[in-house]
């Protein structure tokens, strides 16, 4: 289950940012995950509950936004949505396609709590 590895990756970033900002707690975390990462949001959320235990992000909520896959045709230079992993340009039929979206894995924002 690679969701656990991803959850560990995210929690590391989250704790680093929270410390930098001298936050007391992390309440919510919003991430963007590219479709090609093959993340199952429900599984990632389950892993999240496990990896945050005992940290300042304990009991925080994780929100996953899936970014659809987008290709860029090397032949005609157009971008298009990639469906069903079909990396073929719908404009010119070329199979030489770069992935421009769909591989993201980033923390978009988080809600921190500070000492008053
Ligand atoms: Zn093309």
Image (spheres, rainbow, N blue to C red):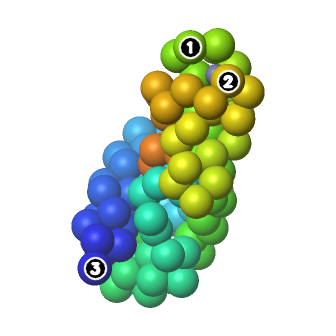
Q: Closest to the observer: 93 or 57?
A: 93
47 sits left or right of 108 in the view: left
Circle 1 — which element?
A: loop
Residues under labels 2 and 3: Cα distance? 38 Å
Indicate whether 42 appears above or below 32. below
State which mark lies toward you, 2 or 3: 2
Residue 107 rendering spot, x and y as whole percentages: 52, 48
Q: Is mark 2 within 8 Å of ligand 1?
A: yes
The residue wearing badge 2 is: 92
Residues under labels 1 and 2: Cα distance? 8 Å
Residue 16 rendering spot, x and y as whole percentages: 35, 46
Residue displayed at 49% across by 32% down: 95
Circle 2 — which element?
A: loop
The residue wearing badge 1 is: 75
Residue 38: tell me if it is visible: yes
Residue 53's disc is none
The residue wearing badge 3 is: 1
């Amino acid at each position: 289950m690679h969701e656990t590895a991803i959850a560990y990756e995210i929690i590391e970033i989250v704790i680093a940012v929270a410390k930098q900002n001298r936050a007391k707690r992390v309440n919510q975390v919003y991430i963007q995950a590219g479709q090609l990462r093959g993340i199952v949001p429900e599984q990632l959320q389950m892993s999240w509950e496990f990896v945050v235990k005992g940290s300042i992000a304990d009991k925080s909520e994780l929100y996953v936004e899936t970014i659809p896959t987008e290709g860029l045709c090397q032949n005609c230079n157009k971008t298009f949505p990639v469906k069903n992993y079909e990396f073929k340009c719908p404009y010119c039929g070329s199979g030489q396609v770069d992935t421009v979206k769909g591989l993201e894995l980033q923390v978009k924002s988080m809600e921190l709590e500070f000492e008053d």
